[in-house]
């Protein structure tokens, strides 16, 4: 098996594509136990990476608006202006 790149070096799209491939391999049930465990571990790292990147993107898009008392009053769309 070729050396896989560190998950942090992947773009969101690359990580998601690889995660989909791993899910397919695991769902097929054809992987031997040791390989299935390795696939599951890599898939979990990819899932966490994708979630982190999605959370960061959402944070960039939304900003919490505060009222005069400093309490959350809603969200404001990210202004790329």
Image (tube, helix red, strand yellow):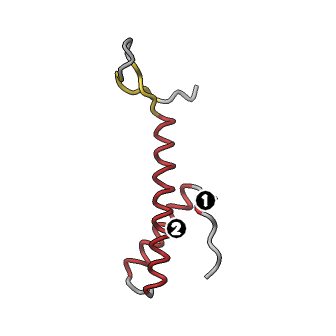
Q: Above or below — where is 44 with respect to 25?
A: above
> Quick one: label 2, few (<14), some, or many (20+) residues within 10 Å?
some
User: Can you give x and y, in whole percent of width and height, for residue 3 in the image?
Assistant: 65, 75
Image position of 3 (left or right of 54): right
Q: CA distance from mark 1 to mark 2?
A: 10 Å
The label shown at residue 10 is 1
Tell whether 47 sits left or right of 9: left
Q: Quadrant of the C terminus?
A: top right
What residue sits 46% from the left and 40% below the top?
58
Q: Position of residue 79 (x, y in %)?
A: 53, 27
Of labels 1 and 2, earlier in sequence is 1
The quarter of the picture where the N terminus appears is: bottom right
Q: Quadrant of residue 24?
A: bottom left
Give left or right: position of 73 versus 11.
left
Q: Secondary structure at mark 2?
A: helix
Residue at screen point 47% across, 68% down: 43
User: Quick check: 73 above or below 16?
Assistant: above
Q: Callout 1: 10 Å neighbours few (<14), some, many (20+)?
A: some
Number of on-image labels: 2
The correct choice, above or below, for 30 with respect to 54 in the image is: below
Where residue 10 sits, quadrant-wise, is bottom right
Q: Position of residue 13 (x, y in %)?
A: 54, 57
Say above or below: 48 vs 81.
below
Q: Are marks 1 and 2 in contact (CB under 8 Å)?
A: yes
Give the residue pinned by disc 2: 18
Element carrying mark 1: loop
Please name the residue shown 46% across and 45% down the image.
55
């Amino acid at each position: 098996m070729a050396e896989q790149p560190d998950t942090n070096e992947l773009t969101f799209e690359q990580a998601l594509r690889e995660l989909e491939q791993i899910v397919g391999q695991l769902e097929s049930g054809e992987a031997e136990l040791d390989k299935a465990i390795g696939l599951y571990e890599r898939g979990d790292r990819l899932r966490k990476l994708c979630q982190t990147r999605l959370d960061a993107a959402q944070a960039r898009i939304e900003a919490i608006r505060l009222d005069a008392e400093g309490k959350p009053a809603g969200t404001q769309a990210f202004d790329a202006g």
